[in-house]
Amino acid sequence: MTTHHIGMIVPSSNLTMETELPRMLRARETRQPEDRFVLHSSRMRMKQVTPEQLRAMNEQTERAAAELADARPDAVATACLVAIMAQGPGHHCTAERQIAEVLRAEGAEAPVVSSAGALLDGIAALGARRVAVITPYLKPLTAKVVEYIEDAGTEVVDALSLEVADNLEVGRLDPQDLTGHWRRLDLSRADALVISACVQMPSLAAIPAVEAACGLPVLSAATATTYRLLAELGLDPTVPDAGRLLSGDLPAARRPTPASRVS
């Protein structure tokens, strides 16, 4: 049995990433018990999902990465998608590199995954060229997310903003509401549905039902981050009941190359 230590950088008001990601890894352990996972978190202050607080939170990244380095993680995920996407297209590469450099300086070599970059990887792994998106954000921030995804080469055919600014309230949204929210989107041209472009908005419990109902692959920022973490660890990216992305049925050629973002 191998134990993998995963570090997470999360907003201080996070409620969801530290529940959904461990839930997926525990589910994987029931099928593949030879791999076990231990998670360690470092927090950055943020309560309101506004451009000002997101920028202030990003300024704490180096401190949070240095704290995680002390635990000598095998991989690190930075888990606030909109904090990175709001900084402009392609910023996930800069953020991942910054964290990797801090880890290295502290004597901890580890691949780094951002939820923003992972979502792009997950869309690509599904072979989707057009997606629809649900976010909890106010409309101006959703527009930033749409711009970011489209800059990476994927058309966003429709987007729904739930317009919840308080990050704690985002974490308290009922994932079962998503089984109705997706029906407000025009999916006629979509290849896939991003049911939660936010690691704080709970969605894991709704993914199987929505995927069955809409007939499209359904992914979230959390499932994409898990997919990318498993790939970076050199493990088969499969998790039961977490949607097509983690089903194990995707062509191997679409899977990301481990440590492809960290040089």
Image (cartoon, rainbow, N blue to C red):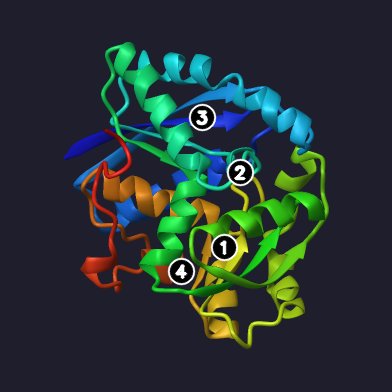
Please tell me which of labels 4 and 2 falls first in the chain.
2
Between the C-alphas of marks 3 and 2, the distance is: 20 Å
155 displayed left or right of 238: right
State if disc 3 and disc 1 touch (CB < 8 Å): no
Task: Say which residue appears at 73% left-offset and 57% top-offset.
Answer: 174
209 over 83 or under it: above or below: below
Between the C-alphas of marks 1 and 3, the distance is: 26 Å
Q: Residues within 10 Å of mark 1 (few under 14, many from 20)?
A: some
Q: Nearer the viewer, mark 4 or mark 3?
A: 3
Q: Which numbered disc covers residue 9?
A: 3
Q: Which numbered disc covers residue 257?
A: none
Q: Is residue 47 visible?
A: no
User: What residue is shown with label 1?
Assistant: 150
User: What residue is shown with label 4?
Assistant: 243
Please tell me which of labels 2 and 1 falls first in the chain.
2
Task: Say which residue appears at 54% left-offset and 22% top-offset.
Answer: 61
Q: Position of residue 92 (x, y in %)?
A: 49, 41
